[in-house]
Amino acid sequence: MIISNISFEKKKFHILFDSGEEIEISEETLIESGLYKGQEVEDEIIDKLKFEDEKTEALLLSYRFLQRNKTEKQLIDYLYKNKISGEIIDTVIPILNEKKYLNDEDYARRYLNDAMNIKKYGKIKIIYMLRSKGIKNDIIEKIMRDYDYELEYLNAEDLLSKKLDSEEKDPKKINSAKKYLQGRGFEFEIINFAVDEFFGGDLNV
């Protein structure tokens, strides 16, 4: 099979073969393959070029997407959304891991730090959010060994101070504040202890 013509149109190179078949590939794939007009190639070249072109496209999409810290699951979902096949995704993920573009443990540690110091989430919500982002349980268990329970308590106290008045022990407001902390992922033991301490250990409601 011979390449009868190579043309450029709409950001893609069109490769026409003497068999009448035609494919579109990127400039990167064209250069890497070293193709030129009049070149004789094997019949299997079309499938190989299509595969390499889709792999190149997947990698370019990944590099752009991973300019901001993302998990492996988030990237996979993004590639599927952009109509990248499972076979190509299975090919590029190991490449990205090897090149350190993906690191779920690093992502999880950064998320944990931001969740506690900026968002002030409790332990339950942090674990839930990590799982929702595709972080595996073994990674979650590993990073939670360094969980700062003192900071969690201080965060609960800080959030309570914005919801309650230590001089006004209104049961409705206290229950509302407890539900608020629960919604932010704090455990009941932390919530009850923080509320009790907030009122100086003298809460009779």
Image (cartoon, grey):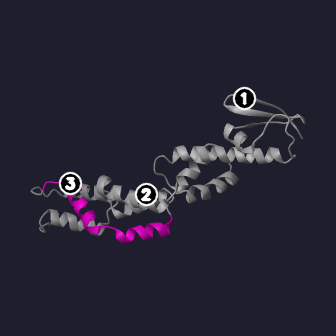
| Lower sequence index among marks 2 and 3 | 2
Q: On screen, 21 above or below 88? A: above
Disc 1 element:
strand
Residue that carries the numbered disc 3 in the rendered image:
173
Disc 2 element:
helix
Q: Nearer the viewer, residue 99 or 188?
A: 99
Q: Does 163 lie within the magenta span?
A: yes
Q: Does 13 lie within the magenta span?
A: no
Amino acid type indicated by mark 2: Met
Amino acid type indicated by mark 3: Lys
What residue span does the magenta drawing correspond to? 136-165
Residue 129's disc is: 2
- Of tags 1 and 2, which is closer to the observer? 1
| Lower sequence index among marks 1 and 2 | 1
Residue lying at 11% horizontally and 66% vertically, measured from the top left: 200
**For residue 155, side relative to residue 184 (left or right):** left
Count neighbours of disc 1 (C-alpha within 10 A) and say few if under 14, some if 14 to 19, many if 20 or more. Answer: few
Q: Is the Cβ of the residue at disc 2 closer than 8 Å to that at disc 3?
A: no
Residue lying at 61% horizontally and 47% vertically, measured from the top left: 59
Residue lying at 12% horizontally and 57% vertically, measured from the top left: 166
Quadrant including the N terminus: top right
Count neighbours of disc 2 (C-alpha within 10 A) and say few if under 14, some if 14 to 19, many if 20 or more. Answer: some
**For residue 183, side relative to residue 75 (left or right):** left
CA gap between label 1 and label 3 equals: 68 Å
